Each structure stands twice: as structure tokens, then as C-alpha cells.
Image: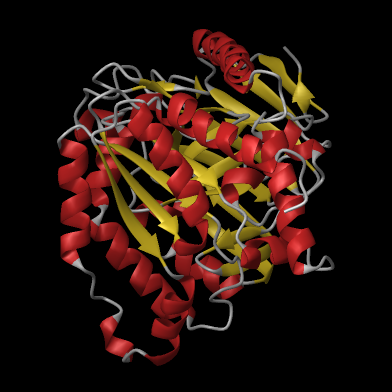
Amino acid sequence: MTIPDFELKMNRYADIIVRVGLNLQPGQWLFINAPSLAAPLVHQVAAIAYQNGCRYVDMLWRDEQLELVRFKHAVRDSFSEYPVYRATGIIQHLQEGGAYLSITGDDPDLLKEQDAELISTARKTALTHLKPVYDMLDRNGFNWAVVGYPTLPWAKAVFPQASAEESVERLWESIFRVCRIDQPDPVAAWQAHVDDLQARSAYLTGKQYHALKYTAPGTDLTIGLAEQHVWQAGSSLTTSGIRFTANLPTEEVFTLPHRQRIDGVVSASMPLSYDGALIEGFSLTFENGRVIHARAEHGEEHLRKMLALDEGMSSLGEAALVPHSSPVSQAGILFYNTLLDENAACHIALGNGINYCTKDGEKISDEEYAARGGNSSLSHVDFMIGSRQMDIDGILPDGSREALMRSGEWAF
């Protein structure tokens, strides 16, 4: 590795994962889900976790090639099966107060040649078994974080013309930059950044807009907002009082749409990497809160399988605002990874909504959440719609409008 001070930067990265992302507390257990290629980062995180009083670090290693072997050779009727002990163990870990770290670095093209129906079946099976985990997550039941690790398959997808070594180094440099590792004091830089995002979310919550109006080439969309919606950003607070930052990096402020008040057409501004396949050049048309038409230049079968996952996948669970000038956008890189790409552009999410994006959402019943307009689904899939050509207005209850974004930048 020829990156100057690479080991120092890697250590800083692991440090902000533990201290800023997870805000791991003395006495907590930590569960890490990571690709096997990310072992060097896992070891750094574990060392810092133990130094900060973690009692035990447990692991679930992922092997992409083993997953590909399954799709190529396993009997076709076995994809509705799942190792139940895995879900049971994670659920028990979280119920007992543990923290959760997911490290992403998957090959975006891993399953592009595989059967979309089998991919959909396998995903739905896993999500069904892990539903209690996502239910706890949506109610801020535990501290968690998602971070990236530049594996070679991912790096080569991002920088296909570079050599293997150069592609990995360029991706590392990009992640260090957008995660503020190059700042003199990365922890202080993160605290200032999160404070700014929190101020914007507080302003928007106070406005209580009835709806958002999006206008851009190929997009003319109105998204009604849930009753008593709350804008969130940067960091969240668990029900036990732990402040954490779930996504590193993060540049968004986001809230809860009303599942029955979404109308118009929206075009994706970036490809979507979904279950090992790319969906590109796609658009969706909504009427009364549901997708009534979907098309894609590439990966349309995967798009349709995604929408057919369950009833809730044809509506929205999140609306997020990101300025075009965000560090991720300014990197000028298509990362083929939602963790990074969603912080380069305004985005929306099909599927499950986030309970804590409505007042007292951690406490209200499922019935009250639905009555306020919240959407429910097994899955939650973000896709990017923003660009330097996007304008967004906030529509007040009396029908008047206020500029929120102009030409992809904050207007307030």
C-alpha cells in the first residue's frame, strides 16, 4: 500500500467507527457482519472496541464466492431455506443490549448472471427471519453503524481501468476523504458536521410541511409527508440513551412520507446496486401512493422482482435531502454502493418506513404508525434521484410553497 500514513489513517477510521459511528459503551458486546476480505479493518475495530471497554466482539463472516456457488449449483427449491440459528443469535445479542456493525464491500455485479427469481426468494427469506432486527432498528432499539471496506471486487467495479492495487488504493483514498479521516481531528470534524445536519433537521421538523415537490429532468413528483413527521439527520438516540451515527459517511436529512399521498413520475439519477445486480436508467410512476408503472434500461427484471417483494414495496418509506455539493458528490465517483451513493444525491426509499421519523415513533403502536401514514415492508431500498438540476419545494398546509433546494443546493 503506497498511501502515505495508511496505517495511521486506517486506525483513525476504526476509531471513528467505534467512537462516532457506534459510540460503543463500556460493558457492551459488539457483533460485526463483514466480508472475509475486510479482516484487517475488523481486527482494528475489535482492538479499539476492547480498549474502550467492550466485553466481547463476535463475528459473522461473509464469503461472496460461496454465495455465488450457491446460486450456481444449489437445488432450485432450496432458496426459501435459512439458517434460523443465525437470526436467533443476532436477535438475542441485540435484546441483551449489544451493538451491531455492518461492513460493506460487496461486488455489485456478483449475481448479475443469476436467476432474478431465486435472488428475490433468498432475499425475502432472509428478511422474514431478520424482521425482528429491523423492527428494533426502526424504533432505535440499539446502536449500530454501516461502513465501507474497499475489497478488490468492489474497487475494480468502481475503477475498472486501474490495476488491482491502484483501484483498491483509490477507493481507500476516497473513503478516507468522505469520512473526514484527512481532517486534523476527525472526531471533532464529525461532531461539527453532525451538529449542522441536526440544525437543518430541526428547522424542517418545525415547518411541518404537508408535502414536498420535486422537479428535475424526468422527475415531476409530489411526496406527501406523514402526520407528525420528524426530520432526522446525522446521529440518532437509542431508547437506552446512546447517541450514535449509523452511516459513515452521512450527508442527509430524512423523514417519513405518507404512503397514500405520492403522485407523479421520478427518474433515478444514478444506477442502483441491488442484490448483486445493477438496475440502470429506471423510472417509476406513482398514483395515490403506489407504483403503477416501472421501467429500466438495464435490470428491469430485478426492478420488478424488488417491487413485487411484498405489498409495501410499491410505496415509499423515506424521503432524504442531500446537497449536490456534498463531499461524496464532489468526489465525482459512482461507488455502486448505496452507503456511499445515497450521500451524493437526494434520494427516496421504496418499502419500509422508519418509525422514529414520526413523533414518539419509538413508542407508538403499529396501528398508530399506519394511521399517521407510515409504510411497512420487509425491505427498505434507497435509490438516488437528485442532481445539480433538481429543485425541491416544501408545501405548507395552506398550499403555499417555500424553496428547500435550488439547482441541487440548500435554499434555506
Q: Could one spot residue 373 in this view of the protein?
A: no
Q: Position of residue 390 (x, y in %)?
A: 78, 35
Q: Could one spot residue 137 in this view of the protein?
A: yes
What residue appears at the point 41 percent right and 30 percent down from the top-left corner? Answer: 22
Q: Nearer the viewer, residue 260 or 157?
A: 157
Instruction: Say left or right for 31 vs 276.
Output: left
What residue appears at the point 47 percent right and 22 percent down from the top-left corner? Answer: 235
The quarter of the picture where residue 80 lies is bottom left
How did the renderer colour the structure?
secondary structure
The quarter of the picture where residue 160 lies is bottom right
Instruction: Say left or right for 375 vs 112.
Output: left
Question: Where is the C terminus found, in terms of image quarters?
Answer: top right
Q: Position of residue 313 (x, y in %)?
A: 42, 54
Q: Position of residue 244 (x, y in %)?
A: 42, 24
Q: Position of residue 59 (x, y in %)?
A: 32, 53
Q: Nearer the viewer, residue 185 or 226?
A: 185
Question: Where is the N terminus found, in terms of image quarters?
Answer: bottom right
Q: Is residue 153 above or below residue 345?
A: below
Instruction: Say left or right for 373 vs 337.
Output: left
